[in-house]
Amino acid sequence: MFGSLVLLLLSSVATSGSLPSGSASSHVSFHSFVERGVFGPISTGSAAGIAGGQIACDSPPVSSFFAGLKPPFPTNSWWAPFAAPPGTGTAAGPFPYESALDGYGVQFGISTNRQWDGTSIKQPTQIDWLASFTEHSGTFANHKATSFDTQSVTIQYFQGSASMTAYLVPGSPYMTFQYSQATPLLKSMHGGIKMFNGRTIAVGETSSATGTQFTVVDTAGTTYRIYALASITLTATSISPNSGTISAGTQFTGVLRLVMLAQASHQALLDQHYQVYPTSVGHDYSFTDTTGTLFFNWNTVGDGSQLLMLTWPHHRLTMQNPNFPATTALGYLTTKGWMYPAIGNTWKMLYQLTSISWNAPRALDSSCSDTVLLGLEYEVGQLNSSQAPVPGDFYYWGGKLAAQSRLALIADNLGRPDLVTPVINYLKASFQHWFDSASSTLPAYETAWGGVISKAGANNAWVDFGNGYYNDHHFHYGYFLNVAAVIAKFDTNWLNQHREYINWFARDIINPSTQDPYFPVARCRDWFAGHSWASGIANGAGSRDQESTGEAVNGYYGALLWASVALSQDYVNYAKLLIATEQQAAQVYWHLYPQAGQTDRDNPYPEPEVRSLVTMGNVQDWQSGAWLFWGSQRSQIAAIQILPVTPVLYDKQWVENVWSYTMPELVNPTIGDEWKCVIIAAYANSNPQAAASWAANLTDWGSGNTFTNEMYFIGTRPNPRGTPICSDFPQNPYGSFKLQVASSGAFVTASSATPNLIATPGSSGAAAATFTSAYVPNAGTLQLAGTGQYVTADQSGSAALAAARATASTWERFTIRRKVGAAADVYSIRAGSNGLYVTVAGDGSLVNNGANEAVAAGFRFVAA
């Protein structure tokens, strides 16, 4: 059923839906769609009480672009470069085209230069034509957006009574320009004009034709069809080998449509459908208990049932009862695969919705219970509300606190309410700083575009990864909402006190309604592209990109948790749909499957060399590649598509491919466990027993994960083998011991006078030092009984271990395991500081410099 709260018209923000001036012809009609199931706003209240107050970003919209319109404005849309200063950047659409605005008109083209450099597939921007009119002076301010919706934007160029309106609608194979009392002018941008309507034109020559259909070929060999919805006379002029124009001799009121003719065989379909064109698009939703359906409804001039549009792979995989012409009838290869045709102005796309919310959909495997509970008790015990972190940024604070919030959910799931309360108190103590106007790091309401930003980043794109310029909001606020939702789940008073405040973060990334006067609809989501863009308006809005699909999914997972505890079922469904669409896009465009065929209809990367990369790191409008802005390791590229580790699933086949792809780094001790733990956890969706075995050797989970969450996740994965997941989970020996070198029999000594750990040949147990081994997850600490000092191992591995630290941290952690190939009571010791094994130097000093266990010294732990 439709979850409608109100009836909205999303097809346009700034128009009433009436027939655009000059667009009517006797044989066409204007169709508009009222959205039946679009939800009302989460709230319509202002953010006047936000701790950071109000502030304007120092990169406001181009002053003339939104003339007559009021914020909120889209910031992460494909067309954001039109609005962000200087307003001349290349926009990521309307695909299959890319476009840009200059003082005279709209530049556009389709890239025909597909490249592969071993890391990325690229299609550099290609500008083929500039659409303008002779009356326009070239004054940049003489253009503006007249309307926009969740996918499209309408741009008007004007000069006096003359105007040209461009309907920029993603998925349309045609670029559509409506002229009113203006003389059309088209300038070739990819070469001169070689041929017009079948007649070759030499430099300096002209050729004229009258009618409604024209063909032009530039000197680069690119062919375009030009369609007029009313008869017009056009004159082509070859100015030079690199430039040319096509112009009308008189003013024209009517519509011109241009389309690249990639193959001659495509002309038949294009000729059949050019008279019906889209002006805008609305979208709608319907839900059952397990599915969500996304509708695209294009407003058209002409018979909407005959609208010709183009689909990407993710559309075709979900469309219900589509009218697909043959793929040979029309197609354009883009960075996201082939765009193939579909007929009709309504698309219906079906998604399976997750049943997961707070916890995994199955109980923790009993074999993992002791391990998880031991870690849970330890990690909760480390939380001190009086020492809860003071936010110094948005991103890292959010990731760390969200990881801690998982402890409360796991404790609740395992029936340990005594461990829930200290976590909630810790989270509240830290979150309290976001409500305090005296805090050094604050959220503020940004007035130029409309949204919540990092106040410190309003004039500095380098603060909080450009949050103040609307970068990464779904990443950041997904964490915020996750933390707030967990607090609210266990503290109703806190929820009632702060609901509206937290809703500002929710509205910033999942507002579903144009009736919210302060936030745009689903800020980061590109509904036609099928996923979110992390890019905001920094650097002129630049190329659209997204690296972390894991955090994108988590953004909407955080929204799901918040909706579950603070909003209505409508918004729960909406968040689930956002999760489902984001996950599908990740699987289609970021996850690579080597077995996918080169001619498979829905394979976005036909080149076998591309598919062998296993995973993309970054997807942009003009390139996709196995690289990141900040790292180049395979484990980093893969892990950022997975983290944070939440109950939401990762697909089995891809994690198996990632496992093999990253294996050289998984066994490399110089690669940090903070990346490995994420990949190991994801691999549990394929083989939880193997994942548990690998997880037993981790010593670091990064700031966005915990040992408890790692093991809980692994222990709640599907287990088709039916064997215990965490069987024989190894751990350090705990208690009071004396250390003896197995090969020499020498005991280890240390004292306040000589804190270095030294195995003295011939020494007896009576003279040996006593060490207390205490639990930390997957490891332990060694504390010299005589002094209370903790044994530490420096990161270089060049100095002797020493009992010289009053408190224990990372460098004071050691993983002690039975040594492979040695007697059952002989152990190896691996230092957490550098991941290297402890050896015995020639002078008897214990040093953490062994590259692998084979060279490690063996030790017996003799009970003291």
Image (spheres, rainbow, N blue to C red):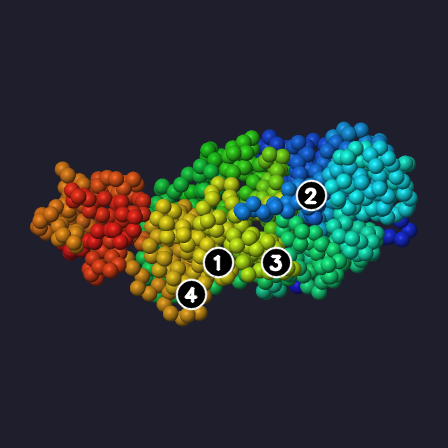
Q: CA distance from mark 4 to mark 3?
A: 41 Å
Instruction: Determine which quarter of the picture holds residue 347.
Output: bottom right
Please tell me which residue is depicted at 21% across the width and 51% down the height of the picture: 857
Count of number-bearing discs: 4
Q: Which of the two labelled residues, at mark 4 and mark 3, occupies the earlier sequence position?
A: 4
As drawn, the label of residue 598 is: 3
Please tell me which residue is depicted at 47% across the width and 64% down the height of the picture: 361
Q: Nearer the viewer, mark 2 or mark 3?
A: 3
On-image quarter of the C terminus: bottom left
Q: Which of the two labelled residues, at mark 4 and mark 2, occupies the earlier sequence position?
A: 2
Q: Is residue 159 above or below residue 588?
A: above
Q: Kindly identify the amino acid type of the residue bearing the numbered disc 1.
A: Asn
Q: CA distance from mark 4 to mark 2?
A: 49 Å
Image position of 63 (left or right of 629): right
* Closer to the camera in the image, 196 or 751: 196
Q: CA distance from mark 1 to mark 2?
A: 33 Å
Q: Which of the two labelled residues, at mark 2 and mark 3, occupies the earlier sequence position?
A: 2
Q: Secondary structure at mark 4?
A: loop
Q: CA distance from mark 1 to mark 3?
A: 19 Å
As drawn, the label of residue 657 is: 1
Q: Secondary structure at mark 3?
A: loop
Asked whether disc 4 touches disc 2, contact meaning CB atoms under 8 Å apart, the reply is: no
Image position of 187 (left or right of 454): right
